[in-house]
Amino acid sequence: MSKFTSFLSAQIESFIAYRTASENWNDSYEFMLTRFDNHCLTNYPGATELSQEMVDGWCKRHDTEKSNSCRTRIYAVYNLIKYLRARGETDVSPPLIPRKERRTYIPHAFTDDELAAFFKACDSLPGTPNRLEIRSRKITIPVFFRLMYSSGIRTNEARLLRTADVDLTHGILNIQRSKGIDQHYVVLHDSMLELMKRYDAAISKLYPDRTYFFPSMKGGYHGKLWLQQNFNRLWAQVSSARATAYTLRHHYAVTNINSWIDVGFGFDDKLLYLSKSMGHRDIEDTKYYYSLVPGMADILEEKTNTDFEDIVPEVDYEEVQQ
């Protein structure tokens, strides 16, 4: 039975099936589409087709709503309408997407001691009571967060990673379910590869026919809430500073960039490799991380006698925490 209850239920289900089959589904869309479906049912109980008034009413920015929050809220509806228009099922115009506001949050700068304490907490998860969920969590969490730390992959890339896309022979991840439809490859560090092999052998005993490398208790993939709750609980044992699991990706980029101070002309090549491995469409997106590296502007100016802004132009940060 469909969880959608308005006249749009069949069309929403069709949209979800299409995007899922195209491997272009964003699991945050379902929550927003459920809210939009409820909006239509509550405010237009007798309606039988979509109208511009319904869409404009839903997509109107609230007085207390930030631009980025509004963008997140209406993107699912925007793509639903595009899908319906392409099939001649509506003539409603897609909503205008608000201009993206530059993020001001500066990710927490992990210290070596904090990271050591965090991974110790990961390794100290209880294995009792002897339930499937508890055993799975105990062996999954230490590997999941170490993979993010050592490879810089996005949170959704780790959650949606399929077993078929993990080459444990050559140590390569085929990241297909990324931001948008981009695909890229990530080479694992030797120590991470060995850890992934041991994890694969252990988790296969609990989920012998799993589809996802890090399976949920029901055999699907873990949701955002699972990720947030587990990271927050473990991080709370280490520090009261604000941090998120996505910050591990920032740390990966910053640590790499910091290690290139004396590489000379090899800097550009390394930046390109980093950009590709992190799944950035353009090297300009990777340059954003320069602004997060302590002292990098001063270092570049000292090494090149060129102003920082001449080397690294202002870029629009396109990363979305997931």
Image (cartoon, rainbow, N blue to C red):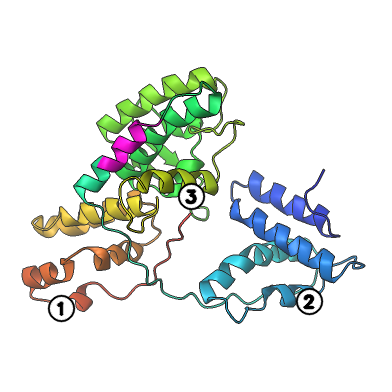
The residue at the point 59 percent across, 74 percent down is 97
Does 131 appear above or below 148?
above
Label 2 sits on what residue type?
Gln
The residue at the point 55 percent across, 34 percent down is 216
In this rendering, position of residue 83 left or right of residue 110 = right
The residue at the point 74 percent across, 73 percent down is 55
Q: CA distance from mark 3 to mark 2?
A: 32 Å
**Disc 1 marks which residue?**
307
Query: What segment is highlighted magenta in the picture?
Result: 117-125
Q: Secondary structure at mark 3?
A: loop
Residue at the extreme right of the image, as rendered = 46
Q: Position of residue 10 (x, y in %)?
A: 82, 53
Label 3 sits on what residue type?
Ser
Looking at the image, is mark 3 or mark 1 earlier in the sequence?
A: 3
Question: Marks 1 and 2: CB-CB under 8 Å?
Answer: no
Q: Is residue 187 visible?
A: no
Question: Marks 3 and 1: CB-CB under 8 Å?
Answer: no
The disc at residue 178 is 3
In this rendering, position of residue 235 left or right of residue 132 = left
Q: CA distance from mark 1 to mark 2?
A: 50 Å
**Disc 2 marks which residue?**
52
Determine the image quadrant of residue 312.
bottom left
Determine the image quadrant of residue 222.
top right
Q: Secondary structure at mark 2?
A: helix
Q: Position of residue 165 (x, y in %)?
A: 47, 34
